Image (cartoon, grey):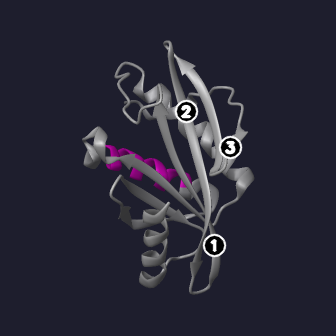
Amino acid sequence: MLLTEILDSKANISWERTTEGFSGSFHVDGDEYQIQLDEYDAALSSGARSVVKLGFTMNGKSTLTNKFNSAKILGIILNSASAKIKTLNPDIVFFGAHHKNGSVDKRMQIYGRLANWYAKNNGYSYCQRSVNTSFAEYAIISKDELSGDDLAVVEAAAKSK
């Protein structure tokens, strides 16, 4: 997977408001990819913080099976979501890998690197600890340093959404 291909891949995404946040879609090789940005607030000890949870599906399923264009697809998702996240300006962003797809550890290594890159280039800090829910594992970036107590609140909020 080439980093330059990830960083250079783009598509024109039309974002629609949903009850959870925003949704946008694009097509590659006849497959439809749906990007979901779920928004909610987490009540931290220092006050309420806005959270955006990034996820995506391929043809309505959380399994990505296009092995030939995975860098391009991941790049489109990252670049399109990044542009929208900048307009939403959340305090905390989650990058998720769904458990039922398998290879969560491998994908979290990639998503963790991408989250860390995004954090460095957009005024966030990368949290070394991920959040693990019954359905996904998330890499976390935050505008403010998260205490252990705050991270527990964020994790509980992620598990309830």
Question: Among all residues in the image, which is located at the extreme top?
Answer: 30
Q: Which mark is residue 34?
A: 2
Prevailing secondary structure class for the magenta stretch in the rendered image:
helix
Q: Residue at x 30, y 38 (%)?
A: 101
Q: Earlier in the sequence, mark 1 or mark 2?
A: 2
Q: Residue at x 57, y 43 (%)?
A: 36
Q: Is residue 101 left or right of residue 140?
A: left
Residue at numbered disc 3:
83
Question: Among all residues in the image, which is located at the extreme bottom?
Answer: 45
**Cα distance, mark 1 to mark 3?**
20 Å
Q: Earlier in the sequence, mark 1 or mark 3?
A: 1
Q: Which mark is residue 39?
A: none
- Range of the magenta residues? 107-118
Q: Which mark is residue 49?
A: 1
As for residue 113 lying within the magenta part, the answer is: yes
Q: Secondary structure at mark 2?
A: strand
At label 3, the amino acid type is: Ala
Q: Nearer the viewer, mark 3 or mark 2?
A: 2
Q: Residue at x 58, y 74 (%)?
A: 144
- Proximity of marks 3 and 2: CB atoms separated by less than 8 Å: no
Quadrant showing the N terminus: top left
Q: Residue at x 38, y 22 (%)?
A: 66
Q: Position of residue 140 (x, y in %)?
A: 47, 61
Q: Position of residue 93 (x, y in %)?
A: 55, 59
At label 2, the amino acid type is: Gln
